[in-house]
Image (cartoon, coloured by chain):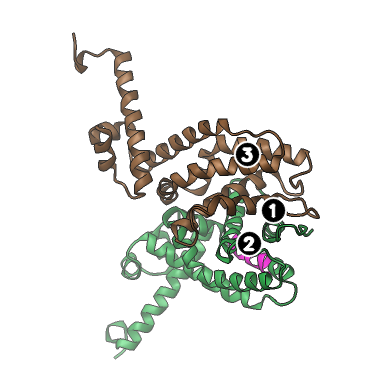
Chain colours: A brown, B green
Amino acid sequence: MTGAKQAKGPARRADAQRSIAAILEAAVSALSRNPEASVSEIAKAAGVGRVTLYGHFPNRVDLVEAALASAIEKGHAALDSVDLTGDPRQALARLIDSSWLLVNRSRSLLLAAQGVLPPGRIRILHAGPVERVEGLVKRGRDEGVFRSDLSTPWLVGVLHSVMHNAADEINAGRLDSEKAAAFITATVLAAFTPPGSRVPG
Amino acid sequence: MTGAKQAKGPARRADAQRSIAAILEAAVSALSRNPEASVSEIAKAAGVGRVTLYGHFPNRVDLVEAALASAIEKGHAALDSVDLTGDPRQALARLIDSSWLLVNRSRSLLLAAQGVLPPGRIRILHAGPVERVEGLVKRGRDEGVFRSDLSTPWLVGVLHSVMHNAADEINAGRLDSEKAAAFITATVLAAFTPPGSRVPG
């Protein structure tokens, strides 16, 4: 009564969950080193066969999307510890600093995703982080610190695209990755400043 | 001595150039309506066979890239008429207005390109427009109107990504295309404002 063949439903499901977790971990790790990492390479690193991997992720696009979703989910959880109280500008600077560390670490994975997923899909995968930023932007608008002549989704999109622009600029060799967080913060705080008010800094 | 079979070298080259021009025109037009437009559909609209098309563009990625390059080149030429003299902020607003008309018209083509080309490649295809913006940004920095605590390539990248963000937001149904130029201009002028100075508007 031992061995995989005798495993009952729940045991099989637990096996499948372990496989999926191992595949996602291997995919995030491999794609974070090399955006072109192959499915075979990821299966090997996860210690599963290609057939098992394809059973869970029918093609490379599905796998890349699941890897990005997994990295974003973990990053989003890690950002729970960022203090978002107090001056909205300072809170936003803290959130950008911590978020950038995660985006910078996932630059290669992001590049892999940009190669196979439309921008709208990548934005949807960021629903958690987007919601967090949205809450902070709304509070900043209510307090008159952030502009309210442009819509909240627009301002959130600006932060998202300026951050991803930093990743692209580093990949292109035009930006030093150590300067990125300061550049993003300076740009976004200025972009969010109400017309007629002074840009901080 | 008439007919394609007797055509000499120069005549064959002229034929090939006409085919390429027809294919590019059909590709820009088809992809501007539908980012998923197929190679067969484009060949048919261009009035050439698939074999001829594949002779010039070995795969769909090459064709999409050439179509985007062609649209950007024509747009870049059209922007020659924008007055870039006078107050750099007003000049930038005029350049954004005119550029946005072109980007907005090519939103679907841009989406097709984003689906098959990495962001770095898309940015390289914009070398002409980037150079024009760069000149204006440099002049604005020299005159103290635009910030000089962030690098010129960074500011140009911010404009590029905020403009493409507008295209993504419209595609996602979160932004009214008639508001886009005003949103982009307000955002970019604020982002370019030197720290300590007031955001215009």
Q: Which of the two discs, 1 and 3, sits closer to the camera? A: 1
Residue A197 placement (x, y as % from top left):
79, 53
Tell me: A91 left or right of B16: right
From the viewer's perspective, tell me whether residue B21 is left or right of residue B192.
Answer: left
The type of residue carrying mark 1 is Gly
What is the number of the mark on residue A133?
3
Q: Position of residue B140 (x, y in %)?
A: 68, 70
Percent position (x, y) of residue A121? 50, 43
Q: Would residue A57 be visible to someone looking at this image?
A: no
Structural crowding at the residue carrying mark 1, measured as other residues with C-alpha within 10 Å and reported as few (<14), some (14–19) or many (≥20) = few
Which range is magenta?
B95-105
Question: Which residue is tagged 1?
Answer: A201
User: Is A73 covered by the magenta stretch?
Assistant: no
Instruction: Select label 2 or label 3 by which is in front.
Output: 2
Q: Chain of mark 2?
A: B
Q: Chain of mark 3?
A: A
Whether residue B97 is in magenta: the answer is: yes
